[in-house]
Image (cartoon, rainbow, N blue to C red):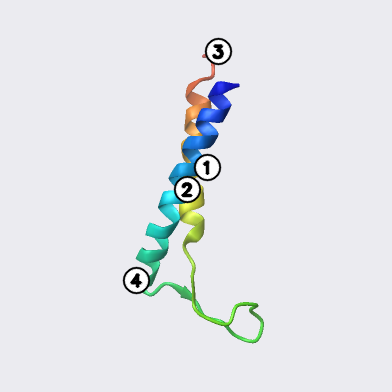
Amino acid sequence: MLDVLLTASVAFIITFLAIPVVIQIAEIKKLYDIPDERKVHTRLVASLGGVGIFGGFFTRFSFICSGLPES
């Protein structure tokens, strides 16, 4: 149980710290989703937020897989 909490905490912290950095990089590179009549948002939105979320997911996945017994 402690392993699950530890990996979830690490994944959350990595995601929490990575998303602002990814958004800042998207702003520097001008990688925006431009609003139009079909979009809900009314201002430019950075479109790389999923990269930070994937980093947290991949970290947790690698921790879980490294703890599995070899067959």
Q: Residue at x 33, y 71 (%)?
A: 28
Judge the density around disc 4: few (<14), some (14-19), many (≥20) Cα neighbours within 10 Å. few
Question: Residue 46: x and y, percent?
Answer: 47, 69
* Label whose residue precedes the other's in the sequence (1 or 3): 1
State yes or no: discs 2 and 1 in contact (Cβ < 8 Å).
yes
Q: Label 2 vs label 4: CA separation?
A: 21 Å
Judge the density around disc 2: few (<14), some (14-19), many (≥20) Cα neighbours within 10 Å. many
Say the numbered circle drawn on residue 15.
Answer: 2
Quarter of the image with the C terminus in it? top right
Say the numbered circle drawn on residue 29.
Answer: 4
Q: Residue at x 47, y 50 (%)?
A: 16
Q: Label 3 vs label 4: CA separation?
A: 45 Å
* Label whose residue precedes the other's in the sequence (1 or 4): 4
Question: Residue 47: x and y, percent?
Answer: 49, 67
Judge the density around disc 1: few (<14), some (14-19), many (≥20) Cα neighbours within 10 Å. some
Residue identifier under label 3: 71
Q: Residue at x 57, y 27 (%)?
A: 4
**Which amino acid, mark 3?**
Ser
Question: Residue 35: x and y, percent?
Answer: 56, 82
State yes or no: discs 1 and 4 in contact (Cβ < 8 Å).
no
State yes or no: discs 3 and 4 in contact (Cβ < 8 Å).
no
* Label whose residue precedes the other's in the sequence (3 or 4): 4
Q: Nearer the viewer, mark 3 or mark 4?
A: 4
Residue identifier under label 1: 57
Q: Nearer the viewer, mark 1 or mark 3?
A: 1
Q: Label 2 vs label 1: CA separation?
A: 8 Å
Q: Label 1 vs label 4: CA separation?
A: 24 Å
